[in-house]
Image (spheres, rainbow, N blue to C red):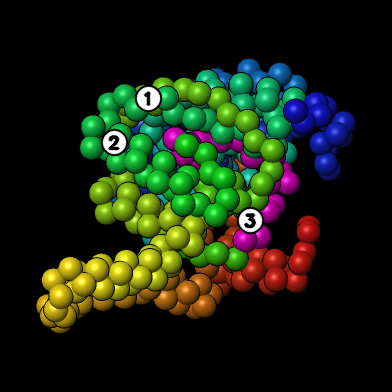
């Protein structure tokens, strides 16, 4: 077990440690007020800790930004980041990680399916020396059998084919030490799968179990298309197995053809069968080529439109140079 972490051991902070909570938001006007109330109640009760809450508005089309600016005007511990459009959940989380100043950073969704009360237990584990504290779902109340079933299958498939160990039934509700946040912030990838990146980084990790709750209000923003996209990114980011599928299928096809020809004692017409097989295999390779294409373009995973701190807007550069700077630092071997 990692050594116990005391306040004096925290880098760059000689007094009370700062805990940041990052909350990505997309059309959460109906719930954001209650979310902030519950988060604040938990964070005020943390022993010997300061706190801040970083809300990231991921291009909401409702009154989410207005509600957030009202919160920031009343609470100096609230910081806001507004993206120019909806870039997606993973880029929004990354934006919050890069903005957060805490010695420990907790990421949690705004819909209250993940209980804020668990943050106190996470901080306790972190103070005991764990740099990563994940929340593992033991149940998913209020979600359809299709969603729970496909999530169950996906996590186990990913664990079976991943090139490095990954955690089962673990989403983005977790606590990360400052050192882990620095590592993730430097990664130059634009096709993000942060859950896999945390596991890839290899820091010591512990987990807490909990039952996921139904949404307090509104509807889920993770449509079937977005869930499929996240699953695709997870498999491509964490495993090289899909790239080997064409070779495996090709060898199996040749073996099956040779066996059938031997049994029937005549050659088989392959033209009617090979087109579909080739299309599937080329499609898999195309996914990797598309991934390479997106990475080579070098576009940042998100663009910041506006920031708020201490209840007032702060300047934002029009050109999003932050991602490029992170990529250069990583390529140069910077350890920050």
* Residue that carries the numbered disc 2 in the rendered image: 149
The foreground one among 89 and 278 is: 278
Contact, CB < 8 Å: mark 2 with mark 3? no
Residue 90 drawn above or below residue 274: above
The residue under the point 46% across, 46% down is 160
Measuring from the top left, give residue 286's x and y in whole percent.
Answer: 36, 74
The residue under the point 62% across, 26% down is 122
Measuring from the top left, give residue 113's x and y in whole percent.
Answer: 39, 29
The foreground one among 69 and 249 is: 249
Q: CA distance from mark 1 to mark 3?
A: 31 Å
Can residue 183 be found in the magenta stretch?
Answer: yes
* Residue that carries the numbered disc 3 in the rendered image: 185
Q: Which mark is residue 139?
A: 1
* Start-end of magenta stretch: 169-187
Q: Quadrant of residue 205?
A: top right
The residue under the point 75% across, 28% down is 1
Measuring from the top left, give residue 47's x and y in whole percent.
Answer: 71, 19
Contact, CB < 8 Å: mark 1 with mark 2? no
Q: Residues within 10 Å of mark 2 (few under 14, many from 20)?
A: few
Q: CA distance from mark 1 to mark 2?
A: 11 Å
Q: Is residue 66 left or right of residue 40?
A: left
The residue under the point 41% across, 41% down is 156
Q: Is residue 263 left or right of residue 281?
A: left
């Amino acid at each position: 077990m990692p050594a116990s972490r005391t306040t004096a051991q925290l880098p760059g902070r000689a007094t009370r440690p700062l805990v940041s909570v990052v909350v990505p938001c997309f059309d959460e006007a109906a719930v954001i007020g209650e979310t902030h109330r519950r988060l604040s109640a938990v964070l005020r009760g943390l022993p010997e800790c300061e706190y801040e809450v970083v809300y990231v508005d991921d291009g909401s089309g409702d009154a989410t930004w207005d509600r957030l600016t009202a919160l920031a005007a009343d609470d100096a511990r609230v910081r806001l980041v507004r993206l120019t459009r909806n870039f997606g959940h993973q880029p929004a989380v990354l934006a919050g990680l890069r903005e957060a100043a805490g010695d420990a950073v907790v990421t949690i969704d705004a819909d209250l399916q993940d209980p804020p009360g668990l943050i106190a237990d996470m901080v306790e584990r972190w103070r005991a020396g764990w740099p990563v504290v994940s929340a593992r779902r033991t149940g998913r109340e209020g979600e359809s059998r299709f969603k729970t079933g496909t999530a169950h299958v996906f996590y186990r498939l990913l664990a079976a084919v991943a090139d490095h160990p990954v955690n089962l039934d673990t989403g983005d509700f977790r606590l990360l030490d400052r050192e882990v946040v620095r590592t993730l912030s430097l990664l130059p990838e634009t096709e993000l799968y942060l859950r896999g990146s945390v596991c890839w980084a290899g820091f010591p990790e512990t987990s807490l179990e909990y039952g996921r709750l139904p949404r307090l209000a509104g509807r889920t923003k993770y449509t079937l298309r977005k869930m499929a996209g996240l699953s695709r990114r997870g498999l491509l980011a964490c495993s090289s197995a899909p790239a080997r599928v064409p070779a495996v299928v090709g060898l199996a096809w040749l073996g099956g053809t040779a066996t059938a020809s031997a049994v029937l004692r005549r050659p088989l017409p392959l033209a009617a069968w090979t087109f579909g097989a080739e299309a599937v295999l080329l499609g898999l390779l195309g996914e990797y080529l598309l991934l390479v294409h997106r990475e080579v373009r070098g576009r940042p995973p998100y663009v910041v439109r506006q920031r708020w701190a201490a209840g007032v807007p702060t300047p934002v550069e029009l050109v999003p140079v932050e991602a490029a700077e992170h990529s250069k630092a990583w390529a140069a071997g910077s350890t920050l």
